[in-house]
Image (cartoon, rainbow, N blue to C red):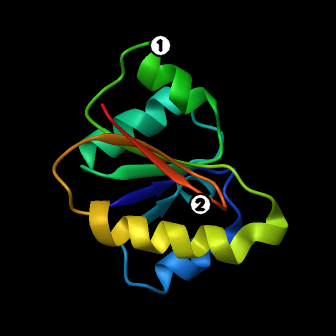
């Protein structure tokens, strides 16, 4: 299950939905819920979170939130095709991976930290 934060562009949501991933879009599910509630949702669905919100990094690393994976996106809209390619590759490797990771995706690199 992929939980997509409400700050992620609708184009990505549509493209991932077209790849037959199980998706919950926070925009449609429950706009405005807290980041902690999104994490609890991801834990309950054994899912991973895709977000552009830096606060998830703080929650994971400073507050010790565990038991869920986060894909944190950092990109310019002009780099969208590169980011999408990186996300699709990551999902092939981590969609059903039993571990938990914080993954930062930029147009030029992917950083993966086990949590």
The quadrant in which the N terminus is found is bottom left
Q: Nearer the viewer, residue 35 or 98?
A: 98
Q: Nearer the viewer, residue 57 or 1?
A: 57
Q: Residues within 10 Å of mark 2 (few under 14, many from 20)?
A: few
The quadrant in which the C terminus is found is top left
- State the residue position of label 1: 62
Measuring from the top left, give residue 32's x and y in whole percent: 65, 39
Say which residue appears at 33% left-offset and 41% top-offset: 101
Can residue 96 be seen at all in this image of the molecule?
Answer: yes
Q: Single out the residue that lies furthest toward the bottom.
A: 18
Image height check: is 36 above or below 108?
above
Say which residue appears at 16% left-offset and 50% top-offset: 98
Q: Cα distance, mark 1 to mark 2?
A: 29 Å
Element under disc 1? loop
Element under disc 2? helix
Measuring from the top left, give residue 46's x and y in whole percent: 24, 49
Q: Along the polypeptide, which appears first: circle 1 or circle 2?
A: 2
Relative to 59, 98 lies left or right? left
Measuring from the top left, give residue 68's x and y in whole percent: 31, 39
Say which residue appears at 26% left-offset and 42% top-offset: 44
The image quadrant of residue 9 is bottom right
Can residue 22 be seen at all in this image of the molecule?
Answer: no
Image height check: is 70 above or below 28?
above
Image height check: is 64 above or below 14?
above
User: Which numbered disc covers residue 28?
Assistant: 2
User: Which numbered disc covers residue 83?
Assistant: none
């Amino acid at each position: 299950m992929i939980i997509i934060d409400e700050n992620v562009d609708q184009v990505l949501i549509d493209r991932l939905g077209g790849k037959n991933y199980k998706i919950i879009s926070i925009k449609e599910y429950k706009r405005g819920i807290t980041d902690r509630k999104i994490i609890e949702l991801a834990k309950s669905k054994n899912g991973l979170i895709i977000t552009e919100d830096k606060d998830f990094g703080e929650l994971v690393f400073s507050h010790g939130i565990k038991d869920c994976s986060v894909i944190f996106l950092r990109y310019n809209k002009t780099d969208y095709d590169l980011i999408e390619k990186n996300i699709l590759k990551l999902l092939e490797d981590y969609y059903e991976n039993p571990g938990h990771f914080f993954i930062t995706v930029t147009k030029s690199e992917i950083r993966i930290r086990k949590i």
